[in-house]
Image (cartoon, grey):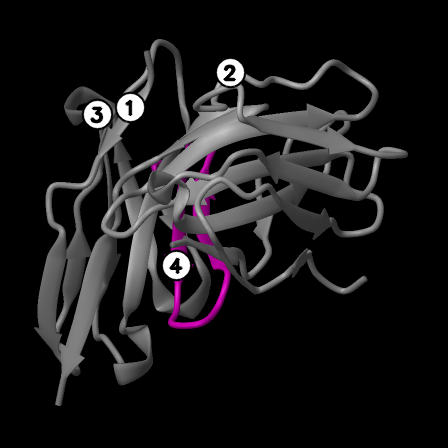
Amino acid sequence: AQSVTQPDIHITVSEGASLELRCNYSYGATPYLFWYVQSPGQGLQLLLKYFSGDTLVQGIKGFEAEFKRSQSSFNLRKPSVHWSDAAEYFCAVGSWGKFQFGAGTQVVVTP
Amino acid sequence: GAGVSQSPSNKVTEKGKDVELRCDPISGHTALYWYRQSLGQGLEFLIYFQGNSAPDKSGLPSDRFSAERTGGSVSTLTIQRTQQEDSAVYLCASSRSGGTNTGELFFGEGSRLTVL
């Protein structure tokens, strides 16, 4: 069965510092992997996705993620966070018709 | 419409009552999903519609939950005899289908259900 684990429930980061959010997955085949962001009062928005090819994926808002098959990971990174990056981030895995989401990581950005 | 529209945005009901939640997907999107987001939990898959195919209902938590999609567009999620544990945000998402699977889900802002 497919599953997604986001080990960090909550992360606090200073504005301008780097950010890395962890995601580990279990999937029977080559997965489709996604990161979504949910800002307060807003719906989930896709940040980036990985289907195949280059394992380093660039997304919106300056985010990137790296697929590491050997570690079953798809960690999200941003070199320098902005106050507007405060939100909840969800990793998802799946294929057409069913997507499994992680429990989310809440990111707090301090001045 | 421009995005996925859900109504009501907030619903407070008494235990035992039935509720209906509505989702209007993005025009042209043939795939529609319902997820449930409880406090501190991730998104829990409920049901998936794809075109005229039989829906995947494997995520519905009990027979009190049902959903339909009329005319391949608007969907209604119905919860009968609501219980307090049904309190959550119900999210609807739609997606394109076709030869190229983008896999991107477009989410509505959700319907927050509170069962007293």
Where residue A82 appears, x then y in whole percent? 27, 81
Name the residue: 21% across, 25% down.
A72
Residue farthest along the bottom direction in this orientation: A111
* CA separation in Å, label 1 and label 4: 19 Å
* CA separation in Å, label 4 and label 2: 26 Å
Q: Which residue is mark 1?
A: A3
Q: Foreground: A31 or A88?
A: A88
Q: Which residue is mark 2?
A: B58
Residue A52 seen in the figure: no
Left or right of B76? Residue B90 is left
Q: Which residues are magenta?
A: A33-55
Do dots 3 and 4 share one subunit? yes
Q: Which mark is residue B109?
A: none
Circle 4 or circle 2, nearest the eye:
2
Do dots 4 and 2 share one subunit? no
Q: Which residue is mark 3?
A: A72
Quadrant position of the C terminus of chain A in the picture: bottom left
Q: Residues within 10 Å of mark 1 (few under 14, many from 20)?
A: some
Chain letter of the residue carrying label 3? A
Return the disc, 1 or 3, that comes first in the chain's sequence: 1
Q: Which residue is mark 4?
A: A37
Return the disc, 3 or 4, that comes first in the chain's sequence: 4
